Each structure stands twice: as structure tokens, then as C-alpha cells.
Image: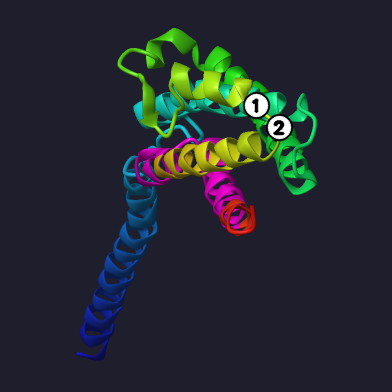
Amino acid sequence: MRIRTTALFTAALAATLVLGGCSAASEEATPDVDHSTHGDTTPSSAPAGTANAADETFATMMIPHHEQAVEMADMILDKDGVDTRVTELAQQIKDAQAPEIETMTGWLTEWGVSLDSGMAGHDMGDDGMMDESAMTALDDADGADAARLFLEGMVMHHEGAIDMAETELADGQFPDALELAQQVIDGQSAEITTMNDILDTL
């Protein structure tokens, strides 16, 4: 009787060990399956720093806008008898915007975009641009008249540039273009204040 009881106990113990071993083996195998499945679900990210249509429009429209501002500044700098506050401001505008033209031209080259592609429908007078008659009047004026025409025209010019920059901040995605747009807003807003202050004293 004792021998039979011992034999039954031994058989039960062996069965328990076998089942335990199977369970352990199953638990060890499970993490490997889960790990491989997790690796397949990692999402891919979109390329960073790419330009969209808003960025391209911002650059192609802002380049000729800046070019006219530099032309207006050159007109004032070539004149005699203009208030030094105005000539200093004209030089400041030229120094800021000329390098920005080069920067934006480089972007268009990098993006494979033609400058002409942004000029369709861009008429003088849009976005604060001076028309031909206003540019001629500025070119022909002297002294205080030239200073006044320059300041009045440049205030409108800057307001147009700020509108364009705000559109870029809202719709663009190219980091450098967004940074430049913010610089335009900050710098030209301050210059508008300065120009209005000078106009009040002319």
C-alpha cells in the first residue's frame, strides 16, 4: 500500500514539473512575438524643412517688393537736402532688405522655382507697391518733398510687406521662411512707427 501511494505521488510530481516547464517556455516565447509586432507599427514621419506653395509664393512676391524698397532708398540716398533722419532710415532699409533678397533668391534656386512664377497677377499698387507715377514723382522730388513722398510711400510699402509676412506665418512651413516673415513683421512695424514720427515733424 505504501509503495503504491509513493508511486502515485511521484507520477503526479513529474506531471506538475512537465506542465510547469511548458508554461515557462510559453511565457518566454511570448515577448519575442510581441516585440516583432511592435516594431512593425512604428509610424513614418514626413520630411522636415520642406517648402510648400505658401513658402514659394512668399519668396516670389517678397523679392520684387524688397527690390522696389531698395530702389526707393537709393533714390533718397542720391539726393541732397534730405532730412538726415530720412537718409539714415533709407540706408537702414537698404542694408536689411538687400541681403534678404539674396537669401530668398537662393531658396527659389534650391526649390527649383522661377521668380517669374510668382509675378503673374502682381500689379504695382498691390501689397503696398508703388506704381510708376509714384516712383517718378519720388525720383523728381527734392528736399522735404522727397522726404515726405518717401516716408508716405514706404509706410504703405511696409504695411503690404507685413500683410504678406502674416500670410506666410499662417500658411507656410519652411522654417527659414517663417523666421524671415517674423523678422519682417518685427522690423518693419518698428520702422513704420519711426516714419510716422518723422512725418509729424516735417
In this rendering, is residue 91 above or below 189? above
Residue 113 in view here: no
Label number found at residue 33: none
Q: Position of residue 125 (x, y in %)?
A: 38, 27
Amino acid under label 2? Lys
Q: Is residue 2 left or right of residue 199?
A: left
Mark 1 lies on residue: 70
Q: Is residue 191 visible?
A: yes
Callout 1: SS: helix
Residue 84 left/right relative to 98: right
Q: Position of residue 196 (x, y in %)?
A: 56, 55
Residue 51 coordinates in the image, percent (x, y): 45, 28
In the rendered image, the vertical position of residue 15 relative to residue 149, given as above or below:
below
Secondary-structure class at tag 2: helix
Residue 87 in picture, x, y percent from top left: 75, 39
Whether residue 194 is in magenta: the answer is no
Residue 177 forms part of the magenta stretch: yes
Residues under numbered marks 2 and 1 in contact, where contact means CB atoms less than 8 Å apart: yes
Residue at image location 64% in from the left, 52% down from the top: 202
Name the residue tied to disc 2: 94
Boundaries of the magenta span:
164-193
Image quadrant in which the N terminus is located: bottom left
Q: Residue at position x 61%, y 37% from top?
A: 145
Viewer-proximal residue, 10 or 120?
Answer: 120
Q: Nearer the viewer, residue 152 or 44?
A: 152
Which quadrant holds residue 18? bottom left
Dominant SS of magenta comes to: helix
Kind of residue indicated by mark 1: Val
Graded by Cα atoms within 10 Å as few (under 14), some (14 to 19) or many (20 or more), the crowding at tag 1 reads many
